Image: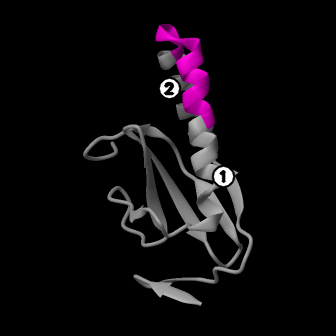
Amino acid sequence: MLKWKHLSLDSGKNMQIKRSEEYFFELQVIMEYVAQDSLKRALVLRSEFDEKIENLPFMPLKNRQSVYFNDVSVRDLIHKGYVMPYKIDNENNIITVLGVYKYKNSIK
């Protein structure tokens, strides 16, 4: 059992990944924007997001605690200037991706 910043994680468990509706909505907006310039770049970016997210169960605590949420179980996965906050629910073995957006100082 690994304890870190009041969040315990049993590293031997298989975590499930879920993506919120907000994540899918925000992803669609980003993909449409990037595709205006290059459809290929949009598809590559989506593939990179998926790869990063699918690797979360292997090291869910790897990323920093979210600066947008006052919760130690919410982390910020950052890729190419995009932030994907995710919540670790160790009790139910679920990682939920809460959204995706360009980095900014605060969420409205």
The residue positioned 44% from the left and 85% from the top of the image is 6
Q: Quadrant of the C terminus?
A: top left
Q: How much space separates mark 2 and mark 1, taking CA atoms?
A: 19 Å
For disc 1, the marked residue is: 54
Q: Amino acid at mark 1?
A: Glu
- Looking at the image, is 91 positioned above or below residue 21? below
Give the crowd class for mark 2: few <14, some 14-19, many >=20 residues within 10 Å. Answer: some
Q: Which is nearer the N-term, disc 2 or disc 1?
A: 2
Q: Which is in the foreground here, disc 2 or disc 1?
A: 1
- Please give the count of numbered marks on the rendered protein: 2
For disc 2, the marked residue is: 30
Left or right relative to 47: residue 79: left
The residue positioned 33% from the left and 40% from the top of the image is 103
Q: Amino acid at mark 2?
A: Ile
Residues drawn in magenta: 35-47
Q: Quadrant of residue 67?
A: bottom left
The residue positioned 42% from the left and 69% from the top of the image is 71
Checking the image for residue 92, the label placed there is: none
Q: Quadrant of residue 2?
A: bottom right
Picture coordinates of residue 12 (x, y %)? 70, 80
The residue positioned 29% from the left and 41% from the top of the image is 104
Q: Is residue 38 magenta?
A: yes
Q: Quadrant of residue 28?
A: top right
Q: Nearer the viewer, residue 55 or 9?
A: 55
Q: SS class of the residue under badge 2?
A: helix
Picture coordinates of residue 11 (x, y %)? 64, 79
Q: Nearer the viewer, residue 99 or 9?
A: 9
